């Protein structure tokens, strides 16, 4: 077994590998850029080596830096994680030349399977079902349009060296094919230093289902079931689960057997994933093979009981697989939700900054949290905005979903925006609960973006009851501190109004054992909890005919309270009836008119500016391109106008809502 390994990655995957290595008694070495000098993976590792400035092209993507770090520390092997150098055959070859083991497949398999064009050719030769398309290298936008016409719209333009949704564009007409080729090649060059793209037929109503494979150096390959990864936004997976609610046993076996055959065709060793697109009739087509560990590997681990990272290490050291296909048993159901630093209410724009408070849900048999952040740490603009992977497990799908909804309520993040409200909405969506999924799910269900109105609809009496309870505790404390209440005697004014969401909710209240009883014009609502002032989580029972166990996050906010539950945020103010009447008369502050400005929707780099001062522009015309978290975002004119002033120039770093262009 190895004595010391280096993790050529960062974030949650670096932390994940370090945990497994320590469990196996292996010393670990972390590498880090300037932006990651205080990162969690650096703190967890036994040693750490600085490899350069924040941009990944100057640090995590430099093969020589990683090899030198191994030489300096005596690391015998390198685990690449995912992304960065994980699918670069040059990296595996450089390590091999230096006498260092690459914990993953060999260079031949990486090249044959990691390159989308070559892998599709090999898959076709091996008899694996493939999507119709053009696998040659496309020279320019005009040729892309010609090829797209021949295949037939809609088509998907994809980066050959791509992954993670980068360098991908859907085109339904000539203009989209032309523009999509340009954007895809630019994004591919920026992310992978390889601007080759190919075009293939886009399957309507598709599901994205992938097969996990595991192979050793002795030609033994098995598949470990499938993962459903259809819930995606901009081709980036958001929710993954195992198994799929769609596959039959026969289709599962056929996909697994084809995945194994493909892996055996390149003598594949280590963990890998064969991805398929599945249509409404359960016909499946090879999409690509990822010659690395997948982001969503925890759901497979939860339903199989296997540690994929441990097996990668054991296979790399030369151990044979001791598991046969007949030994693979899938038990229960697992869900994974990717928690991102982004604002779902602003078209999911990345959110950077410091995690002023960070309390993940407690881990246990039904909850797993893979994270690379900590309270006080920062999310920077240089890397993927993932905060964590939240995973839940249950004996059946409905229970796995319920555990996820509860865990999302328990996830406490402050200091920046995050997508937990969106994840909660997905978990509660009737179509998701039914398992009626396609890769178009988010686009179909949220065609105009995600809004507050899309959050799960809950009985407002629940949050009214919690706000009333919290307010009573504050009133009692203030009364006690002022000497109005002797001893532990509880006495609370019985007429109040809770204001939130633009509505008034009048109620009367009286103390009961362990809480309060509220009258709100219907059945009496009782609230029982041991919540105390200063606690972040209200945990208790709300009784409204049926006991309702709830977890609500509570912040003091101005003169009221900010409550988070089931993805919803409620700014609640508790007033006396007279104060509520007077509050209704207060003028509402009108926000400034910013319609004459093009504002940066996210922190990022202004890559290009397509207009000049004095230029006439039409609605829909490209104005600028902003890059954030390695993704290009094209900003277009919302209406006709004339450019009056340019406020930012290409190459500048932009803050969110910073002015770029002003119109006359």
Image (tube, grey):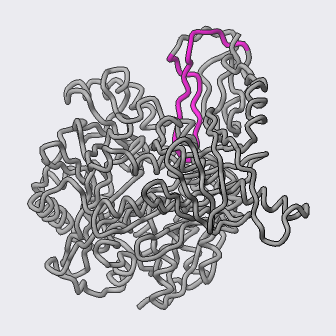
Q: Is residue 53 visible?
A: no
Q: Is residue 437 above or below residue 55?
A: above
In the rendered image, the vertical position of residue 477 relative to residue 14, given as above or below = above
Query: Where does the image place residue 622, in percent across and percent down from the top left?
Result: 53, 21
Q: Tell me the residue at 37%/42% (across/down).
A: 196
Instruction: Estimate the x, y position of residue 15 in percent, counting from the top left.
Output: 53, 72
Left or right: 305 with respect to 614? left
Q: Which residue does the image show at 38% across and 44% down from the upper left?
A: 235
Q: Is residue 444 above or below residue 574?
A: above
* 91 with respect to 29 (left or right): left
Residue drawn where x is 31% and y is 48% of the image:
230
Q: Is residue 635 magenta?
A: yes
Quadrant assignment, res 617: top right
Q: Say whether residue 603 is left or right of residue 631.
A: right
Task: Name the image quarter holding residue 592.
Answer: top right
**Range drawn in magenta:** 620-644
């Amino acid at each position: 077994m190895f004595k010391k390994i280096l993790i050529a990655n960062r974030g949650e995957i670096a932390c994940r590998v370090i945990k497994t290595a320590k469990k196996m008694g292996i010393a670990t070495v972390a590498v880090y850029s300037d932006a990651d000098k205080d990162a969690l993976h650096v703190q967890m590792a036994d040693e750490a080596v600085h490899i350069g400035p924040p941009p990944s092209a100057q640090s995590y993507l430099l093969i020589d830096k990683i090899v030198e770090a191994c030489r300096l520390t005596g690391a015998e092997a390198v685990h690449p994680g995912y992304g960065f150098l994980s699918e670069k055959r040059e990296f595996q070859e450089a390590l091999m030349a230096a006498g260092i083991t690459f914990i993953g497949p060999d260079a031949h398999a990486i090249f044959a399977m990691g390159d989308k064009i070559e892998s599709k050719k090999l898959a076709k030769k091996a008899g694996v079902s493939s999507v119709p398309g053009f696998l040659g290298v496309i020279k320019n936008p005009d040729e892309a349009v010609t090829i797209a016409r021949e295949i037939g719209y809609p088509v998907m333009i994809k980066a050959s060296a791509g992954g993670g949704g980068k360098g991908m564009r859907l085109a339904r007409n000539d203009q989209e094919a032309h523009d999509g080729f340009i954007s895809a090649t630019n994004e591919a060059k920026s992310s992978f230093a390889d601007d080759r793209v190919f075009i293939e037929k886009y399957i309507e109503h598709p599901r994205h289902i992938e097969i996990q494979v595991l192979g050793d150096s002795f030609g033994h390959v098995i598949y470990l079931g499938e993962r459903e990864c259809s819930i995606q936004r901009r081709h980036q997976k958001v929710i993954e689960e195992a198994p799929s609610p769609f596959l039959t046993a026969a289709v599962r076996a056929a996909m697994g057997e084809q995945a194994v055959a493909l892996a055996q065709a390149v003598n594949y060793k280590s963990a890998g994933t064969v991805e398929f697109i599945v249509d409404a009739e359960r016909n499946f087509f090879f999409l690509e093979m990822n010659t690395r560990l997948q982001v969503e590997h925890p759901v497979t681990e939860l339903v199989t009981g296997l540690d994929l990272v441990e097996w990668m290490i054991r296979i790399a050291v030369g151990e044979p697989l001791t598991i046969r296909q007949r030994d693979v048993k899938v038990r229960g159901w697992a869900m994974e939700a990717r928690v991102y630093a982004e604002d779902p209410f602003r078209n999911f724009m990345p959110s950077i900054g410091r995690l002023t408070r960070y309390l993940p849900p407690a881990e246990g048999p039904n909850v797993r949290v893979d994270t690379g952040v900590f309270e006080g740490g920062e999310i920077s603009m240089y890397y993927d905005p993932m905060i964590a992977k939240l995973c839940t497990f249950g004996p059946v799908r409905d229970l796995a979903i319920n555990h996820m909804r509860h865990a999302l309520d328990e996830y406490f993040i402050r200091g920046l925006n995050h997508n937990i409200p969106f994840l909660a909405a997905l978990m509660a969506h009737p179509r998701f609960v039914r398992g009626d999924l396609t890769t178009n799910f988010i686009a179909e269900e949220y065609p105009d973006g995600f809004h507050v109105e899309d959050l799960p609809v809950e009985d407002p009496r629940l949050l009214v009851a919690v706000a009333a309870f919290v307010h009573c505790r504050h009133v009692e404390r203030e009364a006690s501190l002022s000497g109005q209440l002797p001893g532990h005697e509880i006495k609370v004014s019985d007429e109040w109004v809770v204001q939130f969401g633009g509505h008034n909710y009048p109620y009367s209240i009286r103390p009961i054992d362990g809480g309060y009883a509220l009258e709100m014009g219907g059945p009496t609502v009782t609230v029982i909890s041991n919540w105390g002032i200063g606690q972040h989580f209200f945990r208790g029972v709300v009784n409204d005919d049926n006991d309702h166990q709830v977890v609500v996050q509570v912040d003091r906010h101005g003169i009221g309270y900010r409550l988070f539950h089931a993805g919803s945020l409620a700014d609640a103010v508790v007033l006396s009836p007279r104060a509520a009447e007077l509050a209704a008369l207060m003028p509402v502050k009108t926000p400034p008119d910013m319609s004459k400005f093009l504002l940066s929707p996210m922190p990022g780099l202004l890559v290009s500016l397509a207009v000049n001062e004095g230029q006439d522009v039409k609605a829909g015309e490209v104005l600028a391109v902003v890059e954030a978290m390695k993704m290009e975002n094209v900003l277009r004119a919302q209406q006709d106008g004339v450019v009056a002033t340019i406020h930012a120039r290409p190459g500048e770093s932009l803050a969110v809502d910073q002015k770029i262009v002003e119109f006359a």
